[in-house]
Amino acid sequence: MVDIAARVWNHKWKIDPIVRSLIDTDFYKLLMCQSIFRNRPDTTVTFSLINRSHSVRLADLIDEGELREQLDHVRSLSLTRGESTWLRGNTFYGKRQMFRSDFMEWFEGMRLPAYHLEKRDGQYELTFEGSWPEVMLWEIPALSVLMELRSRAVLQKQGRFELQVLYARAMTKLWEKIALLREIDGLKIADFGTRRRHSFLWQDWAVQAMQEGLEGKFTGTSNCLIAMRREMEAIGTNAHELPMVYAALANSDAELAQAPYQVLADWQEEHDGNLRVILPDTFGTAGFLKNAPDWLASWTGMRIDSGDPATAAELAIQWWKERGEDPKQKLVIFSDGLDVEKIVELHNQFRGRVKVSFGWGTMLTNDFRGLAPDDGLAPFSVVCKAIAANGRPTVKLSDNPSKAMGPADQIERYKRVFGVGDQVAQPLVV
Amino acid sequence: MVDIAARVWNHKWKIDPIVRSLIDTDFYKLLMCQSIFRNRPDTTVTFSLINRSHSVRLADLIDEGELREQLDHVRSLSLTRGESTWLRGNTFYGKRQMFRSDFMEWFEGMRLPAYHLEKRDGQYELTFEGSWPEVMLWEIPALSVLMELRSRAVLQKQGRFELQVLYARAMTKLWEKIALLREIDGLKIADFGTRRRHSFLWQDWAVQAMQEGLEGKFTGTSNCLIAMRREMEAIGTNAHELPMVYAALANSDAELAQAPYQVLADWQEEHDGNLRVILPDTFGTAGFLKNAPDWLASWTGMRIDSGDPATAAELAIQWWKERGEDPKQKLVIFSDGLDVEKIVELHNQFRGRVKVSFGWGTMLTNDFRGLAPDDGLAPFSVVCKAIAANGRPTVKLSDNPSKAMGPADQIERYKRVFGVGDQVAQPLVV
C-alpha cells in the first residue's frame, strides 16, 4: 500500500533538510552555552569555518544555492516543545534540571543569527558574528551541513544498487569494528561523531548499531537529538572554545595565564562529578598542569584531545600522583583521532591505572574511506572555531602544532605566556 | 507517517507466505507443462524431495507445522488475472502466444494437488503424486519453501543490526561478483537461481542488482514472477524431467533408447530458434550424441548441466563438426555449479568458438557461505524430482555419478542401453 498522504507531504518540502532540530548538536555545546549565557553573555564573537583539508575543494563540490538553502533552513529552526521538555525534565549525568529556567526560556526564543558566505579559491568562507551564546550554536549544524552536502554531491551519480552496496560496505566495516570492540573487557565508549558525520541518518544508524553490538560498553552519544529519540545518555562536558575566548578577553599577560583556570572555576560552580573533566591542551598540556591551582587536582578526570594520547595520559597520571591524588580513581577520556586499533592499544596501556573512557568521533560516523571513486567520501578535517572575541583574535596551540591557530604574533605571545617549548607534530587525519 | 491500514492488513495474515504466486516458478516448468499437457496428459507421476546434503537435518531445523502452513498456502494459490494476461500476451523468445489457449484455460483452473509429508531420520519425506502436468508444478515452490524456511530458522536468533549487517555482507559479496562479471566482454548471463534461493526477496534483489550492474550482459531471469514485475525476459527451455519420465514409460529397451529423442521430437513441433536447446546428459552425453538422429544437429544449442563442463562443451563442438554444423553458430549454455571463477574460465575457453551463455543459479541467489554461525546459511543440495511414472521408477544417470538416481538394477539397465561406461565423479556443491 502506498501511503499517499506521506508522499504528498514529502512533495511539499522544497529541500531535504540536513539539520532538522536545534538539538541535533553536541551536548557539550548546550552545557557551554549555559555557562556562557551565565558568565559572559555580552561577549561578541566571530566563528569561522576552517577546512584544514585543502585538497577537498568544497566550493567546487557543493552548489552555493544548496548550501544557502540548508543554512537558511537551520536559521528557521526553533526549539520544539518536546525538545524543551526533554532538556528541562531529563536526568543528565545523574542530575535533574541541569538546564536552568532562565537559560531554557532564552533558548526557547533563540534563533540562529545571520551567516556570511563567500567563495574563495575553491573553498567557502563561512563566518558567523554576534553574541557568543547564539553564534556558538552554529558550530555543529554548520559542520553537519557541509559534511552532508559533500556526501550528497559525491553520491549523486551512483546507481540505486551501487548506493545500496556502498552503504552495505560501510555497515559491514563498522560492524567489524564493533565486533572487535565487543571483545574488550571493561570498555567504555561513547559516540562523539556528530560534527564530522557522513550524514544524520548514518550517525543514527551507527549509534544504534553500537547500542546493539556493545550493549553496556556503549555509554551514549554526544548528539542530543539521537540521545532523546533513542533514549540514550547524552554525553559531553566542555571544549577549547571556552579557554580560547576567555584568553582572548584577557587584558594582560597575567590575566591570560589565568584564563584557562578561570574557565574551570566558573565551570565548577555549576557542575560536579563526571562533568568536572579538565581539557588541558588548549595552550599546551604540560604548562597547564604545572601551573594549575591545587583545587583542580580533585576534579574527576581529564580529556585528551591532541598530541600523542599516551604521552598526555602519562603526564596526567604523573600530575595526579604529584598532587596526592589516586589516578585509579580518575577518569581519562580519549577523544582525538581514534579508531579501533588505537582504542585497543590505549585501553590495554591504561586499564587498571586509570578509569579509561573513549569518545569516538569521525571513524565511527564517517569511515567511508575506500568506498567511493577517488576516495571521494573519505572524511576530511573541517572545523568551525571562534576566531575572534570582542574584536581580538583567538589563539589555540594544543599539543599538536598542526592544530595551532591564530595570528603568528599572538601564537608566539601565547607560547611565551604558557611556557610552550618544542612540540611534536602529529598527522591530522580528521 | 504510519500507514495504519497497511499495518492492520498485515496483521490479518496468519503466516508470512514464502510463495505468493503460481508463476513464482521457473519459466521452463511452464514450457514443459504445456508440452506434457499436450503430449502426455494422462501420465501419473510421483515427485519426491531429495536432500542430497545429509548433514543439513531439515526436520530438526524446520517446524513441521510451519512447513505444512506454507505448503497449504501454496495449494490455495491460483493464477491471477494479471499473471494470466502476462502469460497470454507477452512475447517470450521473440514469439507471441507461446502458451496456447487450451493450456491457459487449464492452468487458470489448476490448483496444486495434495502433498504427503513425514519426518524420518531428521529429514522430511515430502512427496507429490498424481497427474503429471499438475504434480510437476510442485517442484519449484516445494524447494523454495524448504530453502526459505531453513533461512528463517537460522536467522531467527539474530539481532536487528546483526541481521542488517548479514544482508549488507551478502550484498557486498554479490556486488563484487557482478563487478568481476562486468569486465567480461561479450558475456551473456541469466538468473537460474529460483529453486535454491535464500529467499524470494533476496532473489528479487539479486536479479535487480544484476540488471543495474551488468546492463545488456544480463539477459533475464528464469523466475516468471520476477520477470513479469521487473519487465525482464523470462529464460529457460527444458529439463531432465522430460526424458526421465518418457524413459520410464518405455515398454522395451528399444523404446527406452529412443525416449530422449522422442522428447525432442515432441518439443520441436512447438518450438524453434533459441528454444531448441538440447539437454543431452540425462543418460550420458557421449552416448546421447553418438546415437542422435541427424535432425538434432540443426538445433540451436546445447545446455551443459553435469560432469566437467569444458569436457562436455568440447564433446558438443566435436559432434557439431562431425555432423557438418558450424559450432560458431551454436549456443552453449552452461548451467551447473557455476560461480564467477568458473564463468570466467569457461567464457575464456569457449568464446569465439561457440556462442557462450550462462545460467547462474545457487551462487547467485544463495551465496551466504560464511555469513552465519557454523555456516548455517551455506546453500545445500536439495532437489525435487520425478521418481516414478505410471508406477515405474525413473532413472537419471547424468555425466556425474554423484547425481545418479533410481533403483540400482534400473541404473545398470540404463547404463547398458545408453552405453555409459566409466564416469568421473564431480563434487556436488549445490
Image (cartoon, coloured by chain):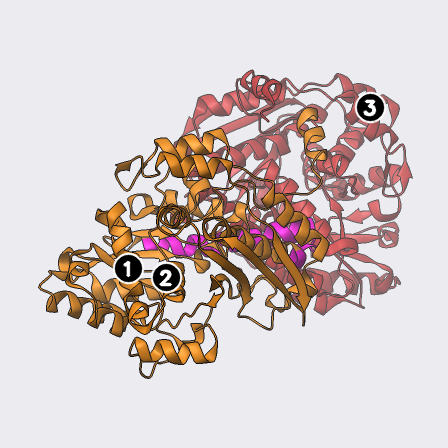
Chain colours: A orange, B red
Above or below residue A180? Residue A8 is above
Q: Are marks 2 and 1 in contact (CB under 8 Å)?
A: yes
**Dot 2: chain letter:** A
Residue B284 seen in render: no
Where does the magenta region start and end? A153-181
Of A221 and B204, nearer the camera is A221
Residue B101 x %, y %: 87, 23
Q: What element carries label 3?
A: helix
Residue B100 x %, y %: 87, 27
Q: In this view, does A286 lie to the left or right of B91?
A: left
**Dot 1: chain letter:** A
Q: In this view, does B379 lie to the left or right of B132?
A: left
Residue B106 seen in render: yes
Q: Do the residues labelled 3 and 1 touch (CB within 8 Å)?
A: no
Question: Can you identify the residue that label 3 sits on?
Answer: B104
Of pointers 2 and 1, the one earlier in the residue sequence: 2
Going by the numbered disc 1, the residue's amino acid type is Gln
